[in-house]
Image (cartoon, helix red, strand yellow):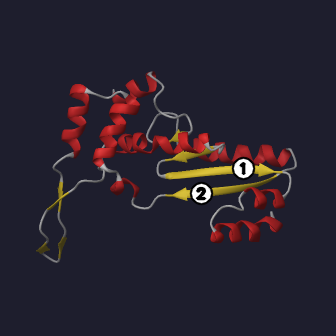
Amino acid sequence: MFVAFLERLRLLRSLQSAYRSKHSTETAVLKITSDVFRAADRGEVSLLCMLVLSAAFDTVDHDILFDRLRQSFGVQGLALTWIESFLRDRTQSVSIAGDQSVEMTLTCGVPQGSVLGPILFLLYCADVIVIAQRCGLEVHSYADDTKHCTSMQTPQQLTTRYSGWSPALRKSVSGCAPTV
């Protein structure tokens, strides 16, 4: 019902696949390959940059998530209280060979095995797509992976466009460009 509400109001990004009907891994792969094939048909070379968040579900800050739910998605009242009660006061401990650690209260993270956790993660990360678009970047996301694909006439144009990036990334792009 929560996802239906978000989709009815068009609050979920169309370029965000995962955890929703008709937005699968296949959707994500088709989007990227289609972009690359269209560029190849135009005689252009493509560069695919991938941002992969490690332990992504574990890093969702609850307070930031609650602020985003209120401000960006209009979640309030009983619905927000319900989501807060779902995440607040969760504890975690570790057991190894019968030895149990002390319980720690979690202030970050959403449960991955739940129905609601992945949707909350998508809402938490929705601004990544908005920020990329404001910077003139076309991106597509699947769960915790964001892909940026760009195409230009020559490898040198790609290298020039991304020359302001980190030295390691710039070296990687320059090293790949001649073989594209």
Residue in the foreground of this view, choosing between 95 and 53: 53
Query: Going by the picture, which residue comes out furthest to the right?
Result: 43
Measured from the top left, where is residue 133 in percent x and y? 61, 40
Q: Callout 1: helix, strand or loop?
A: strand
Q: Is residue 73 above or below residue 52?
A: above
The residue depicted at 21 percent of the width and 27 percent of the height is 78
> What residue is disc 2 on?
50
Count of all numbered marks drawn on residues in the image: 2
Q: Is residue 115 left or right of residue 36?
A: left
Residue 166 falls in image quadrant: bottom right
Q: CA distance from mark 1 to mark 2?
A: 12 Å
Mark 1, Cα crowd under 10 Å, few <14 / some 14-19 / many 20+, is some
Question: What number is the disc on residue 150?
Answer: 1
Residue in the foreground of this view, choosing between 147 and 22: 147
At label 2, the amino acid type is Met
Q: Callout 2: helix, strand or loop?
A: strand
Measured from the top left, where is residue 173 in percent x and y? 72, 65
The residue depicted at 84 percent of the width and 50 percent of the height is 44
Which quadrant: the N terminus?
top left
Q: Is residue 124 left or right of residue 36?
A: left
Q: Is residue 68 above or below residue 91?
A: above
Residue 25 shows in the view: no
Labels 1 & 2 near each other (Cβ < 8 A): no
Residue in the foreground of this view, choosing between 31 and 55: 55
The residue depicted at 77 percent of the width and 61 percent of the height is 159
Query: Going by the picture, which residue comes out furthest to the top?
Result: 8
User: Considering only order in the chain, which callout, 2 or 1, is on the residue closer to the N terminus?
Assistant: 2
Residue 86 falls in image quadrant: top left
